[in-house]
Amino acid sequence: MVTVAIDAMGGDFGPEPIIDGLIDALDERKFKAILVGDQDAILSYLPQFYADHIEIVHCTDVVSMSDAATDALKRKDSSIYKAVELVRDGKANAVVSAGHSGATMTLATLRIGRLPHVNKPPLATLMPNISGQKSLLLDVGAVTDCKPRNLYEFAVMGKAYAQEVMGINRPRIGLLSNGEEDSKGDELTKETFPLLKEITGFVGNVEGRDIFNGSVDVIVTDGFTGNIVLKTSEGVAYTIIELMRQNIKKSIPAKIGALLMKRKVFSNLKKQIDYAEYGGAPLLGLKGCAIVSHGSSNAKAIKNAIFQAIKFADSKIYDKIESELEKHK
């Protein structure tokens, strides 16, 4: 049975939505949970029935969003440090945290450790597309300054994740650029292109629109560009929904139409673009599983982050990444 360590204190709204999400997850699937944080605070939100079945690792310190990521290495009594240590020590298969993302990534990389042939672990995230499936975008913020070798490793890890966790047998891999032609891109993109041609499934350069049109399954880029793409996409989605609301309010026929579409169209649309449906972003290339969730995660997001961690830990992704990188080291 998979064991998941959960940072109970790291989110923007304290332990309540994290514990609610854990309870929802336990009601749907079998796994062992370890909550890490202030025991009194945890028990104030945890019903007795669940308290009898969940292990609690008590600690008093919390790394806040305003703290420097590197400070987390010195804060050995913090909830995120102790949660990561559970994976390092083999007491848990995965860690989930909605706390300081930089601290989570730093601790996971340095304490859990990288797979032998991984230089820098990327952060991957799922993006909606019009095919009804999801696209995997990486890196989205872990490695801002990349070399071609890093992007090559990202492609290998993204392919492995698509196969083992997303269930895509033959993932199509694209290199994000400013044009589809082989000659397009900046110096990094041009130097990376021939490396990615070694990977089965590489389709060439892709543009930003290809993230959402279903023409590719894995999109590779550096963490600086990927983070901008991610946050821009979130902003565009929010703006479109808000503009729709404003225009619907101005017209009675539009209000009637919106009412008729509410259950089918709008509910499905919200589900596809809601970050809570994806749960969190895995940090790939580690010797264990680390899922980084949004600071404002609600119970649904935490539940889905836990499900993602379970699926990741149950997969053979570590072996697939290592075997592929070993071939081309």
Image (spheres, rainbow, N blue to C red):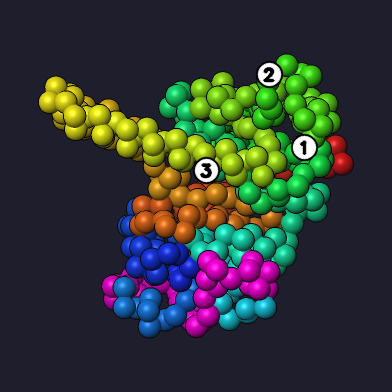
Residue 279: percent from left, percent from top: 45, 50
Residue located beneath label 1 in the image:
152
Vertical comparison of 253 with 23: above or below: above
> How far across and down, in percent of the image, does residue 235 sit?
45, 40
Residue that label 2 marks: 180
- Count of numbered labels shown in the rendering: 3
Residue 93: in sight, yes or no?
Answer: no
Say left or right for 263 vs 213: left
Lower sequence index among marks 1 and 3: 1
Q: Is mark 1 on a helix, strand or loop?
A: helix
Is 170 drawn above or below residue 5 in the view shown?
above
- Quadrant hosting residue 188: top right
Q: Which of 98 and 113 is in front in this view?
A: 98
Q: Name the residue under label 3.
A: 231
Between 265 and 6, the one lying in front of the other is 265
Q: Position of residue 242 (x, y in %)?
A: 32, 37
Given the image, on which type of amino acid does mark 3 rest?
A: Lys
Tell me if 84 is positioned left or right of 262 in this view.
Answer: right
302 drawn magenta:
no
Q: Distance between the Cα atoms at labels 1 and 3?
A: 24 Å
